[in-house]
Image: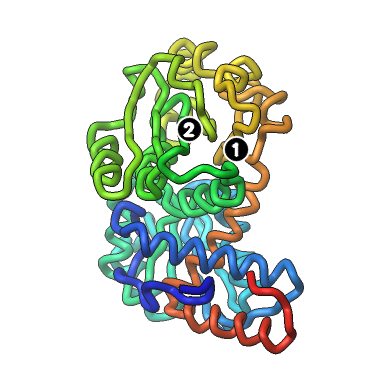
Amino acid sequence: MDGYTLTHTTPTRKDFIDTANFDQSEILDIIRLSRTVRSFIKEGGYLNSMYHKSLAMIFEQKSTRTRVSFEVAMLQLGGHALNLAPGAIQLGAHETIQDTARVLGRMCDMIMSRVDRHDSIEQLAKYSEVPVINGMSDRCHPTQGVGDMITIFDHWPAGKHSNQIKVIFVGDATQVCNTLCDMSTKMGMHFVHYGPENHKISDEWLNIGKENAKKYGGSAIWTDDPACLEGADFIYTDVWYGLYDKETPKEEYMKDFYPKYQVNDEMIAATKNPNVKFLHCLPASRNEEVTDSVLDGPHSAAWDEAENRLTAQRGLVLYFDNMGQTTLDYIKEQKEAGGEAQV
């Protein structure tokens, strides 16, 4: 199969709510599509695959990367994104989420939402006639997960097979940790959650990782033993108190995580891997979960990771609008006509 042919020319599901709902081949389709479109655009190519298409973006929380990446993605593909920020629509005031889904599904071609609770995104998907994409919930962060895998593919350790790659998530078991467990093991990698027991990844998500490992290789474990750091290819962390933990005082989190789980130069050195890469979904609380020297240092791939949110969103809106294969066919034709090397 060449780089321009998808295994699934149409999605197996209408909505992108949780990466755990998709098998390895379909996730690889989305990654392949995203990276090919990225290369084409960076080389000066233009796409109108989403011409006259609209994406409704519902936010129950503040957003930088998710909002900007989806808005720019739709613009670059010839479409339009509507920013429906908190308080800008009737949702939560005089209108239910079910009715909102029905209305937006009749006016727009796709819906993306960042929600307070996972049940809200499931309700949107249930009552919408058009595809719904989960821009983050308290359960998982699937769009971040696609961007993370693209970044890992971009920084793939030379000469290593997937079952030789070790991905360590450090600190609190956030929704980003959950999705990373699923995505990394789905690609056959070894996943480790390194964090305190009272903030460990749930048995549900760890079992998802273990089931993936049975099928694709790799492994999934939780540990609080720093010996796990040795041999890591990717060290990933997230904030210790996030959007879903406002009721917990910062001081309590600092007691649980600092200094053992701070990603600093000493932790990077403990991997004994001179090529280890650092990842962070951002925003970062500098010099808390990660030091400036790591975030801004030579091991950091966090800024590539942030840019790859845009890479991922282009692929996701194309794929779930059933324009993925059509777009790849067009790119292939353009490259062959111009005599350019294939992506």
Relative depth, front residue between 14 and 84: 14
Visible in this render: residue 138? no
Quarter of the N terminus within the rendering: bottom left
Amino acid of disc 1? Pro
Above or below, 222 relative to 342: above
Whole-angstrom CA distance, mark 1 to mark 2, is 10 Å
Res. 124 image quadrant: bottom left
Amino acid of disc 2? Gly
Residue position for label 1? 283
Visible in this render: residue 126? yes
User: Residue 309: x and y, percent?
Assistant: 57, 54
Relative depth, front residue between 262 and 220: 220
User: Residue 112: x and y, percent?
Assistant: 45, 62
Residue position for label 2? 242
Above or below, 341 relative to 152: below
Could you tell me which secondary element the residue under label 1 belongs to?
A: loop
Above or below, 104 relative to 262: below
In this picture the colour scheme is rainbow
The residue at the point 62 percent across, 82 percent down is 48
Q: Residue furthest front?
A: 159
User: Residue 10: x and y, percent?
Assistant: 37, 77
